[in-house]
Image (cartoon, rainbow, N blue to C red):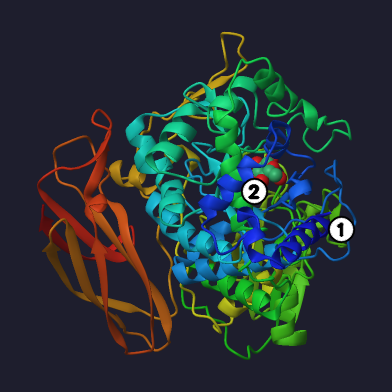
Amino acid sequence: MRKIVLFAAAALMAAACVNRSKLPVYLDQTKDISLRVEDALSRLTTEEKVAMVHAQSKFSSPGVPRLGIPEVWCTDGPHGIRPEVLWDEWDQAGWTNDSCTAFPALSALSATWDRGLSRLYGDCIGQEARYREKDVLLGPGVNICRTPLNGRTFEYMGEDPYLAAQMVVPYVKGVQENGVAACVKHFAVNNQETRRTQTNSNVDDRTLYEIYLPAFEAAVKEGGAWAVMGSYNLYNGQYNCHNKVLLQDILKGEWGFDGVVISDWGGCRDDDEAILYGLDMEYGTWTDGLHSGASNGYDCYHLANPYLERIRDGRVGTDELDDKVRRILRLIFRTAMNGDKPFGTFNSPEHYAAARKIAAEGTVLLYNNGVLPLPEKPEGKILVVGENAIKKMVVGGGSSNLKTKYEVSPLEAFKALWGDAVVYERGYVGDVSTSYNKVSTGQDLSDPRSSFELLSDAIAAASDARYVIFVGGLNKSKNQDNESTDKLDICLPYGQADVIEALAEVAPDMVVVNISGSPVALPFEGKVGAIVQGWYGGSESGNALADVISGKVNPSGKLPFTVPAALSDGPLKTERQYPGIAPEDGSGIWQEYYDEGVFVGYRWYDSKEIKPLYAFGHGLSYTTFDYSGLRLSRNGKKVKLSLKLRNSGDRAGAEVVQVYVSAPEGGPERPLKELKGFEKVYLEPGESKIVEMILDSRAFSYFDAPSHKWTVVPGTYSILAGSASDDIRLEGSVKL
Ligand code: BGC
């Protein structure tokens, strides 16, 4: 269908080319997009306009065939291009050409703290989307990790608004340079999966602007995002897919967003609000999750017949409709009808290489007694234990589920590296499922042994092993890292902690690798040799992990969130904070209160002087770095910072220099420090570099709710530079 419509547009253009002056303005690539939009709009009937503002299938909405204006095709997002589903079903379409490159989960990307890698990620996934003729990529996700329990943390960029903002911008630009819109999701204050469609988030303005909006704001204002997805929850008592404050006042008003607001699938709830409050395209309404059949009735969508009826009987005018259609036309001219767009590439070796690099660079070395890296040619037996060494994890997790050409497991990668020296023991059995939404890994993970037998066999194998590498953690099943459910706690499931402790008795230098997309308590320091935070690394996940374990890549990842020692240490103490309190008014809407305010993640742990297991920004290297010579100078409202970083070890490696600002007394209570700058710097052994950063006035401001303004309290600000939020190496001050 897409090809036929584009062919029709080409035919119109070809006909017009005979006499160029007859080329309709909307087809004339030399004309400004706003002129083309107005010209196209003037040619449309009301019925054609209404057709454009709602879906026609699970992932597409109509164009205007008569005029050669193509349909809009969306795809999930955010880790690869979703396999094709049927026109009107969630079931797989069964195509054989839609196995994509699976990129690492976004939590891994944010752990790289590398803007260049985010750009590379965006560019690669944008190329894959373009090749598959998709116009809108449903991602990236930038909801803040408010609770370590949130099931979708793996799809997001961590707990800090500055880190998420810095990492989302290059991703958006990378995607969009391919003529594919990034659709930044889920807007906004959608920080849990529990009752995600029935919870009203009560959050004060200061917290909203300082913690939950900055990544979206940066994606729109700096990244120039062409689409934003409304979230399922409510804010201010109104569903977010047609939320006046979020969409009209903030996104389109304050930030000047000129793109398209797309509903989350089934997130549109009300005819009138959908018309009035900023929603532009309605998708997924009246489906029953993964279960309902062909009678979705697209004509019955809120923005379909109910809209037409209202226009026809005069209950609403057409101003809102024209605004929506203008935005959709702009989207189409930026994507499908963008004559300058590249053609895209799919499954190229470069994409797999990028996936591997990002996964390796995001891997975080949490603890090391010196056992890592393993020698290049280790002598003796290398025992690998744990389900996540063999379980393929690209499949699963909800809408980010992918079908990939291949996925290298850690065990396969270790075997490729060290051959027959590598032996495997399962140790425990967790989740044996190997398919999701009818995409299958083709594995058989069943194991007839009892837990006792599994553990005994692992211990026996460990007793004569020179090295033991345990690869466990979470997976993407229900109540783990998974859309639509939250985790129930932050402990390792399936008795893995017992397995680790038992193995550590015979192999005290064992390496523990936790694969997860969210914080997991790993209280093994001092009992084992090394602890590594790995992620859902995508197609190349095993190779990336082996690169770090073997020292081919010197780890430089830093935690994008705090890893608490216990869930109860965190800021969410009451039911009203999480998961919300039950309705008493029969509305069916639960109320959740962000009583902790801006004290999220390390902001909380700092202020309460609670030591987490691993702090935000923590991550070790196989080399060491020296910090010296902090200099600060003021230039008007900006502060220039420079310091000297030296690789004082004997291996090349990269360090993420983190800069935190600590505000003086005065104004509202502020966090002890807040991340306001970072730079990832690669150094050869013995090499030094001067690292420079500029802190603008926003770095010193808080959001003053009464005046609705970013405000700087006059006084002396401390500037803290270091290797982690709990490892500050240099301190200076500046008076503002
Ligand atoms: C998810 C979105 C996703 C959409 C389409 C929803 O359930 O929340 O993130 O893009 O489905 O698959």
Q: Name the residue type under label 2.
A: Asp
Looking at the rendered structure, the secondary structure element under dot 1 is loop
The residue most toward the top is: 585
Is residue 152 shown above or below 510?
A: above
Please give left or right for residue 300 compared with residue 336 in the image.
Answer: right
| Residue pictured at 24% horizontal, 64% vertical | 694
User: Looking at the rendered structure, which numbered label has been put on residue 370?
Assistant: none
Q: Quadrant of the N terminus?
A: bottom right
Give percent across and percent down for residue 370.
Answer: 47, 78
Distance from disc 1 to disc 2, alpha carbons, whole Å, reads 23 Å
- Residue to which mark 2 is pinned: 481
Q: Name the residue type under label 1.
A: Asp
Give percent across and percent down for residue 360.
Answer: 57, 73
Is residue 406 shown above or below 2?
A: below
Give yes or no for contact between labels 1 and 2 (Cβ–Cβ under 8 Å): no
Please give left or right for residue 473 compared with residue 35 in the image.
Answer: right
Front-most of residues 689 and 116: 116
Please identify the quarter of the rendering in which residue 483 is found: top right
Please give left or right for residue 78 compared with residue 461 in the image.
Answer: left
Q: Upstream in the sequence, badge 1 or badge 2?
A: 1
Give percent across and percent down for residue 721.
Answer: 26, 64
Say if residue 473 shows up in the picture.
no
Looking at the rendered structure, the secondary structure element under dot 2 is loop
Q: Nearer the viewer, mark 1 or mark 2?
A: 2
Question: Badge 1, how many Cα within 10 Å: few under 14, some, many 20+?
Answer: few
Say if residue 641 shows up in the picture.
yes
| Residue pictured at 68% horizontal, 72% vertical | 540
- Residue to which mark 1 is pinned: 447
Please give left or right for residue 553 compared with residue 614 in the image.
Answer: right
